[in-house]
Image: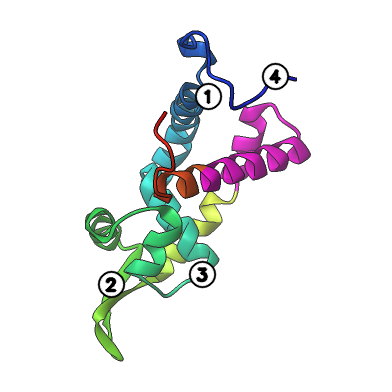
Amino acid sequence: MSDPTAKLDRLPALEELLCFAVYSAGHAFSRVYKPLLDELGLTYPQYLVMASLWAKDDQTVGELGEPLFLESSTLTPLLKRLEATGHVTRSRDPSDERQVRIRLTNQGRALHRKAREIPRCILEATGLSLADLRRLHRQITALRQNLLQSSSAPAANSR
C-alpha cells in the first residue's frame, strides 16, 4: 500500500477528488429530498431544524445551531420562517433573557408524523443496505471530525 502522506505527482482529476464526491453527493441528496420536503412545505435546512426539535424539543438557538454547524445569524431567519408557518414558537428564556428558546407547536409535532417516511425513502434512493448506510455514515462523520480538528489545529509545517 502506498504512503498516504506521499506527495501526489499530479493534480487529481475532478472525479478523483474526495471533496467533489462529497459535494456532488450533497447535490444528489438535495434532488431526492426536494420533492419529499415540498410535500411538507419545508426546505432542507428547515427539515434539519425540525428533525433536531423532533428528537429534543425546547432548545435554545445555540443548542440547535451547534450540531447543525449553523451560526445564530444564519439560524434566526430560518427559525422566524418556521415560526411564521406555525411549526415553532420562539420566546425569551425567563431564567436568562439573553437566550431564545425554540419549541414545537402542535402543528410542528403533527408534521413529524408526516415526515416519518422520509428516512425510508432516502434509504431506498441510496441503493445501500441499512448496514452499509450506517457504516458510510460513521465514516463520513469520522471524516468530518478529522477535517474539523485539522482545520482548527495550528499549522505545524507548511511544506
The disc label shown at residue 84, or none: none
Q: CA distance from mark 2 to mark 3?
A: 15 Å
Mark with earlier residue (1, 4): 4
Mark with earlier residue (2, 3): 3
Q: Position of residue 105 (x, y in %)?
A: 39, 70
Q: Residue at x 44, y 27 (%)?
A: 23
Do the residues bearing badges 3 and 4 touch, measured as CB atoms within 8 Å? no
- State which region is magenta: 117-146
Residue depth check, mark 2 versus mark 1: number of the one nearer the observer:
1
Q: Quadrant of the N terminus?
A: top right
Q: Residue at x 43, y 37 (%)?
A: 157
Q: Position of residue 49 (x, y in %)?
A: 41, 56
Q: CA distance from mark 2 to mark 1?
A: 39 Å
| Amino acid residing under circle 3 | Lys
Please give the residue where the numbered disc 2 appears in the rendered image: 90
Mark with earlier residue (3, 4): 4
Please give the residue where the numbered disc 4 appears in the rendered image: 2
Please give the residue where the numbered disc 1 appears in the rendered image: 18
Mark with earlier residue (2, 1): 1
Q: CA distance from mark 2 to mark 4?
A: 54 Å
Mark with earlier residue (2, 4): 4
